[in-house]
Image: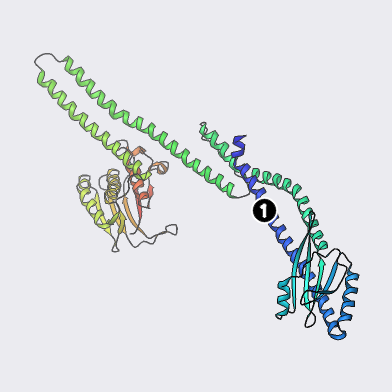
């Protein structure tokens, strides 16, 4: 019960009903006020005509005729409906209708004052309390002659009765309407919340380890459907992240096992050999241990390097490591990288050439990360190109970005005439630890391209690759211009 009272559906229902009742009440109040003022306007209009007519007769035929006409018209309207009084300025009444019902109607001093200071007529409403009813009377005053005043009044009983009926009808209709509003409100609230329920149910199923569940998307295209689509997209992303993590832990387990096994093997072999050696061969045993220590250090360095690269990729991809951005001249940086790798190229008899465009190639980036990216790509190009091959690095700062790019891009191209990448490997080369068949005999961890791509993306860019097995590979790095 407590849960229901706190539920959004319940509160929404209450709000619907409250708003419905409030707007009905406001509409009622407005109509009531309009009808009341219209009735009063009509009554006042009739009263004015009435006294104006008597005033005219007074002017034309004198006081007696005016009294007779007033009496006749009061009788015609009915004793219960209208009355009149004629009195002098002093307040002495000299003619009136039957005042049995009206003797409590007062002669208002303010009205007399207003009339004798120039006002042609004066209107007021008087309230006569009679037991538990309160009768309203509309009264008009008109000055007929120098000292003579006419007071004419009508009962507002009929108007009051009409308004009373209106009130009763309204409240009579409001009770069933209120029940109706409650039912419609509950229905609409349930309908509005049904989508949220759907999403809630799916979230519960997922929390119970069913990551494959998706929220059914309706066909209305409303906010709830949009929420469901966004929720499903988020689930897709989470699922892909989870499978990435799973894949990565598998890879880590697999890739760390080999060096650790190697380290263990070295230690085991050295120990076994030393135990077999007899006395007098201490120097040989010592040399074995020194060699083992050197090998272990080398393996550990490789392992540490791999772990550091994995961390760098994760931190760059997740944005944990904020890039230290500042303007970087890519041309100068690429030139330095080329000089650094030239000895490697010469060792492998590879022709390494550089083609720097004329336009400025300044990007806003983290120079250390960009250097690592360029070094990885250059290292790969030299590693997978046989002796006699060619590696060309070019930079284009005047390239117009594709329509998909919001900004102009600097394009760095590294192409080689190496072994190339087979089509079936191409979609996977940016995955962590992925190594193609041709890389079996070469050193590497399968992390270089993952890091390069993470760096390019962190700078708002991307890497594209084109390759033909046996002919060569071209990597294009696109980074937004500063
Ligand atoms: P690795 O340490 O194996 O070089 P990378 O992540 O740098 O790892 O590259 C992934 C794979 O992509 C490599 O194993 C190789 O098969 C392929 N590859 C990358 N660059 C080239 C290239 N220039 N030519 C041919 N194959 C390449």
Q: Position of residue 209 (x, y in %)?
A: 51, 31
Q: Give the residue number, with chain letter if any, for mark 1.
A: 22
Q: How many marks?
A: 1
- Quadrant of the drawing holding the C terminus: bottom left
The quadrant of the picture showing ligand 1 is top left
Quadrant of residue 215 within the rendered picture: top right
Instruction: Please say if 58 is above or below 324.
Output: below
User: What is the secondary structure assignment of the residue under circle 1?
Assistant: helix
Instruction: Please say if 390 is above or below 279.
Output: below
Nearest the eye: 394 or 326? 326
Q: Within 10 angstroms of label 1, few (less than 14), some, or many (20 or more) residues?
A: few
Nearest the eye: 444 or 299? 299
Instruction: Please say if 224 is above or below 360.
Output: above
Nearest the eye: 457 or 32? 32
Q: Position of residue 126 (x, y in %)?
A: 76, 65
Q: Is residue 442 visible?
A: no
Tell me which residue sits at (20%, 29%) in the image: 295
479 horizontally vs 329: left or right: right
Q: Position of residue 189 (x, y in %)?
A: 64, 45
Q: Is residue 67 visible?
A: yes
Tell me which residue sits at (38%, 48%) in the image: 467
């Amino acid at each position: 019960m407590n849960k229901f009272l706190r539920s959004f559906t319940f509160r929404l229902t209450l709000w619907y009903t409250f708003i419905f009742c409030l707007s009905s009440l406001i509409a009622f109040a407005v109509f009531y006020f309009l009808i009341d003022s219209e009735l009063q306007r009509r009554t006042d209009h009739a009263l004015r005509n009435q006294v104006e007519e008597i005033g005219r007769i007074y002017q034309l035929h004198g006081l007696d005729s005016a009294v007779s006409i007033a009496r006749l018209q009061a009788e015609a309207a009915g004793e219960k409906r209208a009355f009149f009084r004629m009195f002098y300025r002093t307040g002495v009444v000299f003619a009136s209708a039957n005042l049995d019902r009206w003797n409590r109607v007062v002669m208002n001093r303010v009205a007399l004052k207003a009339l004798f200071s120039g006002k042609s007529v004066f209107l007021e409403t008087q309230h006569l309390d009679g037991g538990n009813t309160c009768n309203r009377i509309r009264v008009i005053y008109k000055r007929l002659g120098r000292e003579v005043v006419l007071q004419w009044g009508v009962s507002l009983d009929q108007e009051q009765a009409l308004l009373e009926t209106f009130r009763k009808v309204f409240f009579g209709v409001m009770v069933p309407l209120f029940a109706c509003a409650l039912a419609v409100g509950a229905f609409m609230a349930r309908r509005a919340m049904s989508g949220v329920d759907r999403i809630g149910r799916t979230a519960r199923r997922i929390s119970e380890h069913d990551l494959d569940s998706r929220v059914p998307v309706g066909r209305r295209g409303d906010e709830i459907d949009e929420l469901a689509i966004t929720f499903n997209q988020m689930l897709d992303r989470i699922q892909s992240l989870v499978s990435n993590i799973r894949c990565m832990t598998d890879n880590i387990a697999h890739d760390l096992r080999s060096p650790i096994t190697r380290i263990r093997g070295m230690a085991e072999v050295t120990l076994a050999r030393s135990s077999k050696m007899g006395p007098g061969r201490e120097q040989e045993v010592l040399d074995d241990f020194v060699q083992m220590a050197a090998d272990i250090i080398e393996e550990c360095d490789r392992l540490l390097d791999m772990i550091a690269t994995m961390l760098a990729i994760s931190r760059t991809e997740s944005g944990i490591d904020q890039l230290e951005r500042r303007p970087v001249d890519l041309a100068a940086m690429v030139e330095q990288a080329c000089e650094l790798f030239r000895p490697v190229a010469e060792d492998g008899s590879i022709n390494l050439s550089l083609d720097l465009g004329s336009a400025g190639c300044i990007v806003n980036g983290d120079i250390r990360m960009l250097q690592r990216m360029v070094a990885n790509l250059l290292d790969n190009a030299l590693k997978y190109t046989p002796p006699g091959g060619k590696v060309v690095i070019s930079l284009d700062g005047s390239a117009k970005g594709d329509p998909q790019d919001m900004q102009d891009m600097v394009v760095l191209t590294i192409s080689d005439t190496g072994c190339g990448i087979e089509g079936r490997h191409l979609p996977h080369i940016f995955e962590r630890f992925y190594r193609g068949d041709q890389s079996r005999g070469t050193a590497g961890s399968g992390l270089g391209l993952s890091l390069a791509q993470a760096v390019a993306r962190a700078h708002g860019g991307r890497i594209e690759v084109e390759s033909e097995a046996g002919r060569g590979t071209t990597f294009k790095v696109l980074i937004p211009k500063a």
